[in-house]
């Protein structure tokens, strides 16, 4: 806490202490007010402005310091000033005093509370940002709720000061009128407990809830308008509880969960079960990476004490192994397995024809027969159509031909000169693989460095390793066009204002993936897409139609298999049980890994993002080159970098570069998800010698940086005394 905060806290504490020490609280009882009513009225008649101003200042101070007695002051205002002026004075004094208390709470405690409990308060913060004015209005209308708590607690939230003041002014007005009016009849009042009858309190509560109810009603009316053009198409009964379009990671998990809770579910896939992950993404790429790494290790045999290791390979056999791995894993995502689970699996093209109906065009059973069409109705629909490789409109691209992360698995001949366009995770993984198999790889990236989502030092480390393996890195190069000159294919690129030609035999596009949002009826239903071309959904994964959901790559914001599966749980549960309770997607802890060698894994913030967002962090770093197991495995390369709240062991983000980084990051995913600090990691036993010990050692680095030096000094003196 800063010096100014401590100073303000001391001033406020002194004011509260003085109030009770001097016995001022004794003047705010009903008997005391009634005994002094005549004196104050007489003084007001002689010095109206002095009394009114003094009363205003006293009320303002009471409200700002959250002192007891505001109710009695409100009653006294009615007795002295009458209903009109008493209401005016109290209304403004109470609102301004409440705002001062609100600002004091915000200045003193908000940063501290949000930094320590920000992840737990994220949902509350979002709710306040969305409906804070309505919630505050409801609380202000209920006089039995301690107003000073409202001031203090609202100060910890992101509600704007202007909103707080004006809503408080309006919300406390009716209660002010009631108490001021009581003050005009002060002689007849024996107790304040009977002022607010249960009926009056119920009226206040109902009035406070009115804006929230009105908002819900407005939302319901808006939904009815959305469905209005389709009302005639709504079936009286549905064929299925749920229809899922797409059998990739998101669709499979959605269907699995629906079947597990005994819902009737149909899963529609037009191509292959398992989607991109099984057939063209995670599974084949990791199989290829393993073969390339084995070859690379064999060539480094001298580092392991082996003088020479002769290795030969057939690239076609390597690619056949990739297909064998896919075939081995395929039963996990097969039609047979999901039908055994109770899922109705349908092969065909799906198209939305209404908010509750999906038309499926199924291929003919025999050649020459027409395709069959049928309509399946469902109470809820989940869109999980995935994404496809992005193919940019670069002139000449179709002339030279190209591979993508979808089609590269069909080749059986190793490209001699491979041009990889794109320095993101896919481009980096495949570029390193083909370089290790013997291709002369040139990687072209428009950005100034590889892996732009990671910290610059991560990019530099990977770039250095790539250069050492013979990959020709062309960073800061923009692809202009493709040409064929004298039978040679070449890319014309621009770098630092100059054009240059890069020759190649095969080009591989690795420029990201584009969501599959066309061709299945979104346009006809008016379902919007975002600037990133994903389906536009709310926090519950609903589209503009509350019964149509989207999850996975087609909805974003992440394009990973594990995030698709994560979203699928929310899509399935919200679709099947959303009328009773809905769950917003939790994006608080999202890990990912780029499977280069070394691997790059991350969860939460990195330094670049923290600086861009203005978030204060403390950085603790441990070099894996110091780890016993890494040294023994000839993998002493990389680092772990942990970002924590300054002065706290609470983890905000972790970046790991090194062997098995994708596995090592799992401990920090659990740490962040369960809000466990580095002290707990340090106190957890880790097996020796393992790579996982690095997680404990980085926690030890943090602990050493926060060692209590004064206590250690006293301990040193104690031990010397014991000699």
Image: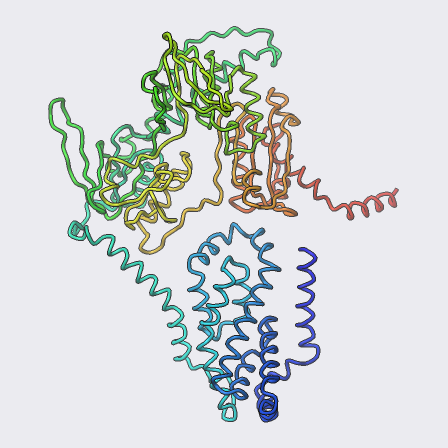
Tell me, yes or no, if residue 97 can be seen here.
yes
Q: Residue at x 51, y 90 (%)?
A: 186
Left or right: residue 543 versus residue 204 is left
Picture quadrant of residue 3: bottom right
What color scheme is it? rainbow
Closer to the camera in the image, 612 or 295: 612
Q: What is the tally of numbered marks visible in this picture?
A: 0
Q: Residue furthest front?
A: 497
Residue 412 percent coordinates (x, y): 36, 12
Closer to the camera in the image, 380 or 723: 380
Left or right: residue 602 versus residue 233 is right
Q: Residue at x 19, y 36 (%)?
A: 360
Residue 212 percent coordinates (x, y): 37, 64
Residue 321 percent coordinates (x, y): 39, 16
Tell me, yes or no, if residue 290 can be seen here.
no
Picture quadrant of residue 336: top left
Looking at the rendering, in which quadrant would you find the C terminus? top right
Relative to 122, say whether 279 is above or below.
above
Left or right: residue 514 versus residue 690 is left
């Amino acid at each position: 806490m800063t010096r100014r905060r401590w100073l303000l806290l001391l001033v406020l504490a002194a004011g509260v202490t003085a109030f009770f020490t001097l016995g001022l609280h004794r003047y705010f009882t009903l008997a005391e007010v009634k005994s002094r009513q005549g004196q104050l009225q007489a003084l007001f008649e002689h010095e109206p402005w002095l009394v009114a101003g003094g009363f205003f200042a006293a009320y303002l101070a009471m409200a700002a310091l959250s002192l007891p007695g505001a109710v009695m002051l409100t009653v006294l205002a009615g007795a002295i000033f009458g209903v009109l002026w008493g209401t005016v004075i109290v209304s403004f004094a109470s609102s301004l005093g409440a705002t001062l208390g609100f600002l004091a709470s915000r200045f003193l405690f908000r940063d501290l509370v949000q930094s320590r409990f920000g992840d737990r308060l994220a949902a509350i913060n979002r709710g306040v940002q969305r409906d804070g004015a309505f919630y505050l209005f409801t609380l202000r209308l209920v006089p039995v709720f301690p107003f000073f708590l409202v001031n203090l607690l609202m100060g910890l939230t992101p509600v704007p000061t202007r909103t707080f003041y004006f809503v408080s002014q309006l919300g406390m007005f009716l209660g002010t009128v009631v108490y001021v009016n009581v003050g005009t009849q002060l002689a007849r009042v024996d107790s304040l407990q009977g002022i607010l009858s249960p009926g009056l309190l119920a009226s206040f509560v109902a009035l406070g809830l009115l804006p929230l109810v009105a908002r819900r009603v407005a939302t319901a009316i808006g939904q009815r308008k959305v469905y209005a053009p389709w009302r005639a198409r709504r079936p009286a009964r549905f064929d299925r509880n749920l229809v899922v379009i797409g059998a990739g990671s998101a669709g499979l998990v959605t269907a699995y969960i629906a079947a597990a809770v005994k819902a009737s579910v149909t899963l529609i896939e037009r191509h292959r079960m398992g989607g991109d992950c099984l057939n063209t993404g995670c599974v084949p790429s990791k199989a290829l990476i393993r073969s390339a790494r084995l070859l690379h290790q064999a060539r480094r045999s001298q580092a392991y004490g082996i003088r020479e290791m002769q290795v030969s390979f057939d690239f076609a056999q390597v690619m056949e192994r990739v297909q064998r791995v896919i075939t081995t894993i395929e039963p996990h995502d097969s039609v047979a397995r999901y039908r055994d689970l109770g899922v109705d699996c349908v092969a065909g093209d799906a198209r939305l024809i209404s908010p509750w109906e999906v038309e499926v065009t199924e291929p003919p059973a025999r050649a020459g027969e027409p395709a069959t069409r049928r309509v399946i109705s469902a109470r809820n629909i989940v869109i999980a159509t995935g994404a496809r490789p992005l193919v940019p409109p670069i002139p000449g691209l179709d002339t030279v031909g190209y591979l993508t992360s979808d089609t590269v698995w069909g080749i059986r001949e190793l490209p001699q000169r491979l041009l990889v366009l794109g320095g993101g995770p896919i481009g980096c993984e495949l570029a390193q693989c083909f370089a290790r198999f013997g291709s002369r790889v040139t990687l072209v990236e428009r950005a100034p460095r590889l892996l732009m989502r990671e910290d610059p030092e991560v990019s530099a480390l990977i770039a250095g390793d790539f250069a050492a393996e013979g990959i020709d890195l062309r960073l800061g190069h923009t692809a202009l066009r493709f040409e064929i000159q004298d039978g040679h294919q070449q890319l014309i690129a621009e770098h630092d204002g100059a054009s240059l030609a890069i020759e190649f035999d095969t080009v591989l596009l690795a420029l990201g993936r584009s969501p599959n949002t066309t061709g299945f009826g979104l346009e006809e239903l008016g379902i919007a897409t975002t600037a990133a071309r994903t389906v536009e959904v709310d926090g519950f994964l609903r589209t503009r139609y509350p019964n149509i959901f989207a999850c996975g790559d087609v909805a974003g914001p992440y394009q990973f298999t594990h995030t698709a599966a994560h979203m699928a749980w929310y899509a399935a549960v919200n679709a099947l049980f959303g009328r009773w309770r809905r769950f917003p997607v939790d994006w608080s802890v999202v890990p990912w890994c780029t499977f280069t060698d070394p691997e790059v894994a991350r969860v939460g913030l990195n330094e670049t993002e923290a600086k861009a967002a203005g978030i204060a962090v403390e950085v603790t770093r441990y070099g894996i080159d110091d780890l016993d197991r890494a040294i023994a495995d000839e993998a002493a390369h990389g680092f772990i970098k942990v970002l924590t709240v300054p002065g706290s062991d609470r983890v905000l983000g972790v970046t790991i570069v090194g062997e098995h980084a994708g596995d090592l990051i799992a401990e920090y995913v659990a740490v962040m998800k369960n809000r466990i600090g580095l002290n707990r990691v340090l106190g957890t036993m880790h097996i020796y010698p393992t790579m996982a010990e690095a997680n404990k050692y980085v926690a030890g680095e943090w602990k050493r940086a926060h060692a209590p030096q004064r206590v250690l000094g006293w301990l040193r003196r104690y031990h010397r005394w014991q000699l």
